Every structure is written in C-alpha cells, then in structure tokens.
Amino acid sequence: MGYLEVEGVAKSFGPAKVLSDVSLALEEGEFVSLLGPSGCGKTTLLRIVAGFEEPDRGTVRLAGTEITAEPPAKRQMGMVFQAYSLFPNMTAEENIRFGLKVRRVDANEQAERAQELLELVGLMQHRGKYPHQLSGGQQQRVALARALAIRPLALLLDEPLSALDAKVRVQLREEIRRIQQETKVTTIFVTHDQEEALSISDRVVVMHQGQLSQVGTPAAIYGEPDNIFVARFVGAVAELPAEVVDGTEGIVELFGRKVRAARAQGMAAGTRIYFLLRPETVRVGPEGANGGLDGTIAGRTFFGALTSLRIELADGHGSVTTAMPSDQAGELTPGARVSVSWADDAPRILRRE
Amino acid sequence: MSEAATAAGAPTRAHRAGLFARSGGVLTLIFVGPFLLYVAAFLILPTLMLLATAFSGAHGFTWRYVGELDQAQTLIAFRNSIELSAASALVGLVIGALAAYFVMRPGMPRGLGSLVTTFSAVAANFAGVPLAFAFIATLGSLGVITVWLKSIGIDLYGAGFRLYSILGLVIVYAYFQVPLMIIVITPALEALRKQWREAAENLGASSVDYWRYVGLPILLPSLLSAYILLFGNAFSAYATPYAISSGIVALVPVEISNVLSGNVMLSPQTGAALAFGMILVMVAVMGLYALIARQVGRWARP
Ligand SMILES: Nc1ncnc2c1ncn2[C@@H]1O[C@H](COP(=O)(O)OP(=O)(O)O)[C@@H](O)[C@H]1O
Ligand SMILES: [Mg+2]
C-alpha cells in the first residue's frame, strides 16, 4: 500500500470530463511529477489531493487514512502555487510563519522554524522584505519555505517554476530536488515541461486527456514509452511506419527492406508498428552506406554543445531528426546527401492501430 | 547573434527614448495642462476668494468672522455635521462592504453583480430634495411605514424617533452612502486573489484567520480611503438635510445657506468663514488619514 494514494478518481466540470478513473500511489518520501500538456487535468488532480476540489468518484488516502472529504485546512499538506500566492501584506518571514501562527504554535518556536527554513532556501538576508520587493524566484522560494514550515505530510507544487525565466527555472528546480531530498517529504510536482519532470523526479506520471498515460522512472518514460502519445510528448522522436516480418528473429519491414529490430522479438508477423528513433540513436554516414536509409539534410539547428539535423528521407518517407556533438557536424550542411543508420537495439517499437 | 542584435538595437532604443522624452513633455502639457487649468479655475481660485471674503471686513483684513466660529450655535452645527458624517460613513462602509462581498461570492446568480453595480451608480447620485421627500413619505411622522408600523403596535415616533434627527439623517444618508461604498469597494474586493485564500486554507487557516490576517489587512487601505470619501460625501450634503430637517438639526452646510440667503441674517463673510471651517475639518480628517494610511499600507510601498 502506498503512502499517498489516489484511487479511481473521476471529475467533471459540467459536461466536461476532466479526470476519468485516475489511480496513483506514492511511496513515502517519493518525488513524483505529473507531466502533460496544458488542459489535461494535472491541476485538477492536484487540487483534489489538496482538498480544493471534491472528486465525483474515487478516494484519496494519506498514510492509511481516507481524507477524500477532509477540508484543505485539515490535510496538513503544503502547497506551492504557480505565482503570486504570497500574502502581500506580510514579510517573507511572516509568510513562512503563517501556518504555524494559525496553529497557535508558540512564538519562539515559530521564529526558530522560520529561521531554519529561511536558511534552507537561502533567503536569510531577505527575511524582512515584502513579496513585491522580491524577485519571482525569491518569491517562489518563500512559498516553498512557507509550505514546508508546517512539516507537511505531502508537498504539492503546481507549476511553481513556469512563471520564471529559464536560468532561474533550472536553478530553482535543482534546489527543489535538493530540499526534497533533505526533508524527505513526499512530493507531487506538476509541470508541462518534460525536461523539468525528467530531471528531478523519482517517477514521472504522463497524463493525457484526464487519464494516466504512463507511470514510470524518467529513464523508462523516455526510453520505453508505452504508447505513441508518451513517445511524442516526451523528447523528440521520428515515427516510421513498419510491419513485423519475423517475430522470432526480430525482423521488420521498413520502406520495403528488411531490418533487424531487437524489440520486435516476440511480436506476431504482420503486426503493424511504429518504428521509433530518438535523435541521439541516429547515426549519419555518407550516402549509400551499407544498410542505411538515404536522405537529404533539410535543416540544421545549433544548440551549443549539440547540433540537431533534420534529414528528409528519400522517396517521401518522412523525416528523421538527429542530435550530435557540434564539433562532429562540420560538413553536414543543408542540401548534403547522407544516409542514416542505427544500432539494432536502438529503435523502440509500438503497435500501430 | 544576440550580441549583434543588441549592438544594432541599442542606438535605436536610445534614439526612441529621446523622442519620447521630448514629445512626452508636449503630450504631458496637452493632457495635464487643461486639467491643471481647470483645478486652478474651479478649485484654487474659489478657495482663495473664499479666504479673501472670510478675512475681509469693511475696513480690510479682519479676524472677526473666523473668530465668530466659536459661537455656541456654530459649534453645535460643526459637532452635528461631524457626528452625522462619521456615523453615516461608518454605516455605509460596513453595509456597503458586506453587500459587495456577498454579491460577488461565487455561486451568486450571474448578472446580479452588474445589476447591483448599475443600481448603485444610480442610487449613489439620488440625493437632494427627491430623496428627502421619499423618506418623509415613508419614515416621516405620517409616512406609510411609520403608520403601518404603528398599526402593528410599533410606535416609532412615540419611542422618540425623528426623521429630522441625527439618527434619522444617518438612515436617509445610507440610501446614497451604501451604494457609493459598493461602487468604490468592489474593485478592491475583486483584487483579492483566490490563491491567497487557498494558500491560507492550505496552511491551516480558518475563514476567520484568513480575514483577520490576510483579507482585511489587504483591504484596509481601500477601506480607509472609502471611509474618507463617504465622510466627505456626507459632510458636504446640503439639499437632503435641508429638505428633511428644515433647520431643526443644525448642520454647517445648512447654516451657510441660511446666512447666504438671508434667512436669519445676510452675511457672505460669515458664510465664507463657515466654509473655511469645513475646509479645516476636511484637512484635519485627511491629515489623520494620511498618517494612518502610512501605517496600514506599509507593505505596498517600494
Ligand atoms: N473550476 C473549473 N470549472 C470548469 N472547468 C474547469 C475548472 N477547472 C478546470 N477546468 C477545465 O478542466 C480542464 C483541465 O484543467 P486543469 O486541471 O487546470 O489542466 P492542467 O492543469 O493540466 O492544465 C481544462 O479544460 C479546464 O478548462
Ligand atoms: Mg494547471
């Protein structure tokens, strides 16, 4: 049994079905991200866990106790909102002490706890500032400290970084992970940014249209997508239509030729599949190289350390994207004719309807 | 890439800023100039003339009229005016704020909000003789409500109530003070973020905790300025109390009218001195407001 459990939760707003039969269990101390496109129901699920929305069906349990009907104030969960949730009339320190104050905790203890948290988030010298005197990143640190001050049984974060600029976002997400590991608080982190989810989570939950599409470690989500939605949403991928020819040997037919694909083993001959290639598994060689697919470089994007090439396959067979260290991309300019290849065990295989 | 863009962009931006700075001066003059002129013509000039009148006698400068402000009758008028304004502003503030809050609560019928705002905009300006007669017809000694209440055994006037008393005027003033409060406080209530309430709840706060530590402190500056507005609104009201009390309740604006129209005596200087006294009261009230506002709005200053 999990520590924080959501079971069979469904929720509609009027005619709009927002969540259908969602079940999820977190271990104590686990960091789980809810990842999905905007509108897929992440916030609604988080608000049901926090108690701000009541599910139409299903239950929420925390540490073995059902809390589905408990009001938010009784749940002892710390929540961090997207932005602008600090009380503007209180200093950073007063914000952090708020949860303790309304619990009528002794003033000395409040001060001690606030000090601990100000140190934890590195804002000691800003303790006396009002929210509007703090930067966006500092405000979110205070919000995090405020949520942690009550020693929450679970920490819930709803896109806490999405209003910040790129550099602060990366810094703060690493800090959130560090703080989570120090405090060992069970955490649900909502984001629509796959890089964010993959980089800081123990497990990632990919959501799609009110359902959980896949639940797994970041490596599994990226490397072994369960379905085409996850494959497309997490990381770039080339999808080539193919068909299994020999399930025992792992041979598939791709654009009229037989290629080996280790992961097609065990599938029935004749199964229509997607042959999926992640950019980093694609190798680029001279045109006509043995066993490769021929194509023409159609686009080139420089990302600093990496350069990405888009290769238009011959005969209108679609395109493949590759990412390679920039210093190896020298001659590969748009218009150049090349061939693409990959290791036998690189392609991911998904059933195609 | 970005360096080149900055290098190319910088001079352009500087150039533009320069243009704006120059045309900004002209634009400011075009838009603010007439306003300043207006203020000078219709606020500053009349005030100066008022002062001039208040301080000039037959033989030039005199303290006489301002000195006469300490007569018993005048002091009573000032006390009545201040009490009436303070009380009716408080009534308007409390009832108006609560009304605005309940109208805005989620789950209220759609359209109720705009209906109430529209009604308020009209009612806030419905003062003067028509309002006075409306109340005389309902709560006057022979008004329909008075008579009806008497028929079911509640004798308002027997119990000492008079429409032409401070209490009576507070009730009448509520008719325009409450709507005015609804109009001025609604934007401030709308500016209370849902996240603040939810964050408070999430941290374990009750509804009372939320209002005590978050909602009211955030609203306080708006409530204070609304109070000042309502105070001034009541303080300067003239036609309504004149029609209702016809001089029974001494109020400064009514006194001014008396000395200007020659009801009691004809003395523009006394009228000007009374008006000068009203200005002093408002200056004192606003000074007090500025002091308190500095305290309660501390957190909003850069
Ligand atoms: N209170 C509400 N009333 C009506 N519709 C809502 C409400 N909250 C969310 N929705 C709808 O539910 C869907 C999911 O919303 P949300 O959970 O906020 O998605 P996400 O956080 O993944 O972007 C959206 O289509 C949104 O418009
Ligand atoms: Mg959301």
Image: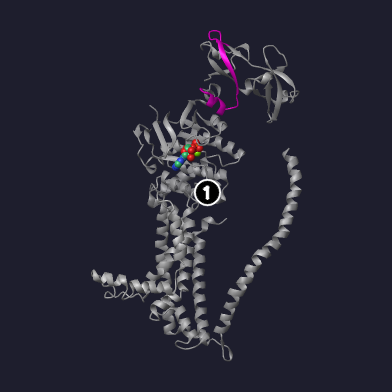
Q: Quadrant of the N terminus of chain A?
A: top left
Instruction: Relative to A11, say whether B141 is above or below.
Output: below
Q: Residue at x 43, y 51 (%)?
A: B110
**Amino acid type, residue under disc 1 in the picture:** Arg
Q: Is residue A109 visible?
A: no
In percent of width and height, residue A278 lies at: 61, 22
The residue positioned 46% from the left and 73% from the top of the image is B235
Find the residue positioned furthest to the left: B153
Taking the magenta stretch, the answer to whether it contains residue A211 is: no
Q: Residue at x 31, y 70 (%)?
A: B145
Please state if A240 lies on the left or on the right of A74 as rendered: right
Q: Is residue B138 or residue B160 the one in the foreground?
A: B138
The quadrant holding residue B172 is bottom left
Q: Chain of mark 1?
A: A
Foreground pick, B212 / B27: B27
Residue at image mark 1: A127
Q: In the structure shown, which secondary structural element does the residue marked by tag 1 occupy?
A: loop
Up-down relation of residue A180 to residue B210 (above or below): above
Ligand 2 has an atom within 8 Å of the beta carbon of the residue at disc 1: no
Q: Residue furthest toward the bottom? A: B59
Q: What x and y, as percent, mark residue A87?
A: 48, 50
In the image, is residue A236 part of the stretch drawn in magenta? yes
Which region is colored magenta?
A226-251
Tell me if mark 1 has few (under 14), some (14-19) or many (20+) residues whose alpha carbon lies within 10 angstroms of its own. Answer: some
